[in-house]
Image (cartoon, grey):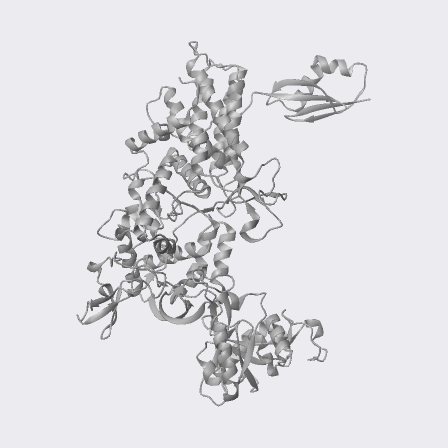
Amino acid sequence: MESRYNPAEIEEKWQTAWTEQGLDKKPTEKNKPKYYALSMFPYPSGSLHMGHVRNYTITDAIARLKRMQGYRVLHPMGWDAFGLPAENAAIDRGIPPAKWTYENIAQMRQQLKRLGFSIDWDCEVATCSPDYYKWTQWIFLQFFKAGLAYQKEAAVNWDPVDQTVVANEQVDSEGRSWRSGAKVERKLLRQWFFKITDYAEELLNDLDKLPGWPERVKLMQANWIGKSTGAYLEFPIVELEEKIGVYTTRPDTVYGVSYVVLAPEHPLTQRVTTPENQAAVEAFVKEVSNQSELERTAEDKPKRGIPTGGKAINPFTGEEIPILIADYVLYEYGTGAVMGVPAHDARDFKFAKEKNLPIKVVIVPPQEAEKPTSQEGLQAAYTEPGIVVNSGQFNGTASTDAKQAMVEYAEKQGFGKARVQYRLRDWLISRQRYWGAPIPVIHCSSCGVVPVPDEDLPVLLPDNVEFSGRGPSPLAKLESWVNVPCPTCGTPALRETDTMDTFIDSSWYFLRYSDAKNEKQVFDSSEVNDWMPVDQYVGGIEHAILHLLYSRFFTKVLRDRGLLNFDEPFQRLLTQGMVQGLTYMNPNKSGKDKWVPSHLVDPNDPRDPQTGEPLQRLYATMSKSKGNGVAPEDVIDKYGIDTARMFILFKAPPEKDLEWEETDVEGQFRFLNRVWRLVSEYVNQPRAVGDNQTQLSKPEKDLRRAIHTAIKEVTEDVEGEYQFNTAISELMKLSNALTEASCKNSPIYAEGIQTLIVLLAPFAPHISEELWHQLGNMESIHTQAWPKYEESALVADEITLVIQVNGKKRADLLVPAQANKAELEKYARESEIVQRHLEGKEIKKVIVVPGKLVNFVVG
């Protein structure tokens, strides 16, 4: 056997063999339980980074383990390939988005294959491929038929220089467009939405069906859905027929309402504004329209507002109260109007103080209920429950009870009702961009919105488009593509030129993997129902809300369309931590300039190469901007794939951040070399023919116990929480036990060598396969059954008993493990060493700790 461990040689050899053997293919037979192991698919940016490698290594170790545990495993990979970066590349580099994307996919696929992941590449999908987005469009039409896709006017970010819509992520913190630098405006455009709010209650309740999800992710989703119970109340407008509807979770404070606020863009704003206030209101509306939603709702910004001159009537008191407009109220949220209760809401209190608006106390702490209520000199809003005052017939009621009583009163009087509301808003899926799935509808002046017939799908993205980054979407400028006959009546009509949000593509890709080559239907329901739900999903915490929420929504809609028979897509979720690199920062600089790339720094004397100033040393998430990344190929070239995998799995539990340390990588390389030497020496040494003795010697018993302890501990570590780091520690212990064993000719030693390699296989697949074959095996190690431990092997025949005199250790004694207290004391008293220490002394007390020690207390 080769005496030196050469990773490059064996890794390439076994990857080729595994491909030829089809080891990673999705099994077709159904005679085993299924296991679906899935990593969140990447955006094809061009090269893998260490974050990718960590994610896929975790999932691959799980997939390999589950195959050995007797499951049929689906472990696929694909590409989240639509989106803005490809379009920007088209503008900046002058190449078509498709060319840029497919080149990146080819490069990243090659990198993934080199890493030896046990992926079934026959299941590969790319969301930008017409054979995938045909079905994305078909799913859109399912939503449309179910009444879950609709168009309405919505505010967008408008770049007045480039004359185009920009996404929220393209607007900087100062509200400027990332490309032109122009101040972004808010503009109303007709857009497509999905009615996710129809599923808000089920999306919230079904979080209880996900015990395998981290609690913090479930909490993030629940907060995003944001269910609240309250009341819808209507405030009549003086001298107008209309009423202002508000939603409040605090109807118990309604007698304290001293003003109402409209969103500046609310349709009623113009109607309620008096002539003398018109100029000021128009100027304010224009100013606010240039602010992003983020700017308007930021907690740390002062709330700005002005009076309209209009008045409303508090329906509970009959009092006239002023109507204002303010930047913090958004038309898209709730009713687009709020009631102001300064005495009992911190934001309203601050706003009322600034605007000199009335502040009326209507709830007091229980201990102050008997005192006369003072409206003067209030220093802060009282927001806790209490006793209702200054509220007519409801005076003296506990505020918690008053909520329901006041809502019932409003319902009887016809100016309000109880309402459950959600923070969740319908999902805006329109994008005025090219590189996305075209929305498959046609606008006809006679028939209205007409879905593209199924037989005409996919609506293909045309190639002959121009990318300038200015003006409307490239599709909207392509008249030959836009102008089509109506599928219903044949008259000239117009295609929809918006494409879909890329979150749509990633909301169902996990369903397509199980039947990726199906040309006749979106997927075969029997295949999807067999493989789904995903048993283990692995990906970053940054997708905890939107991607996971949208995927859950899609699953429920497709279930209700009769395509699936399950409620939730992902049984278990693992959000892996970030990979952090050693980072150097100049505290005297700001912005991007403060980061100094690692390769420019002497680690023994870290100084800024430009200024000579001392640098701070810290660990931070790897990124290009910080210059602290480690290229996966550099690590592989130096140490091999298995070492990189072992380091990633050993350094930190999967859910924690991982600090990249070259010395720890070397430590794993040394461990694999030790395993290589152990097996190499075993294969090369002549072995005596055993005499088939049934009685094991003490060294054999000890080694057998170490072997079965390793099987038990590793198995427990990789079940449940996937504590790969402690599992690898157990492998190191077994390796040490084999190194120190004095029974190298024994069949027990052979069992130990074999067990070590089998347990190592999911973590370091290449070296394990090589060593397995060096032992003379013909089948792949990855088709072997995961070992089971024997309880009897874990039981020690003998234990080491510590013997103390007056608490000082005097001897170690091998005694039968099953000995009781009296027997342990007897063994201790009979020991020669102990007898010498006890000679001529009076034993005052004997303390026996079974299995551990005997302590003689002497005078």
Q: Can you say whether 677 is above or below 599 in the image?
A: above
Position of 258 with respect to 123 (left or right) is: right
Residue located 56% across and 39% down the image: 601
Q: Quadrant of residue 77?
A: top left
Residue located 47% across and 57% down the image: 221
Q: Residue 396: x, y in percent?
A: 64, 78
Count the marks. 0
Observer-nearest residue: 383 or 293? 293
Q: Residue 289: x, y in percent?
A: 47, 72
Observer-nearest residue: 783 or 518? 518
Residue 755 seen by the camera: yes
Q: Can you say whether 854 is above or below 121 in the image?
A: above
Q: Quadrant of the C terminus?
A: top right
Residue 529 seen by the camera: no
Q: Can you say whether 759 is above or below 840 in the image?
A: below
Q: Residue 719: x, y in percent?
A: 46, 38
Q: Can you say whether 624 is above or below 329 in the image?
A: above
Q: Residue furthest front?
A: 610
Q: Quadrant of the N terminus?
A: top left
Q: Residue 437: x, y in percent?
A: 31, 58
Q: Quadrant of residue 806?
A: top right
Observer-nearest residue: 328 or 790? 328
Q: Residue furthest left?
A: 490
Residue located 40% across and 18% down the image: 2
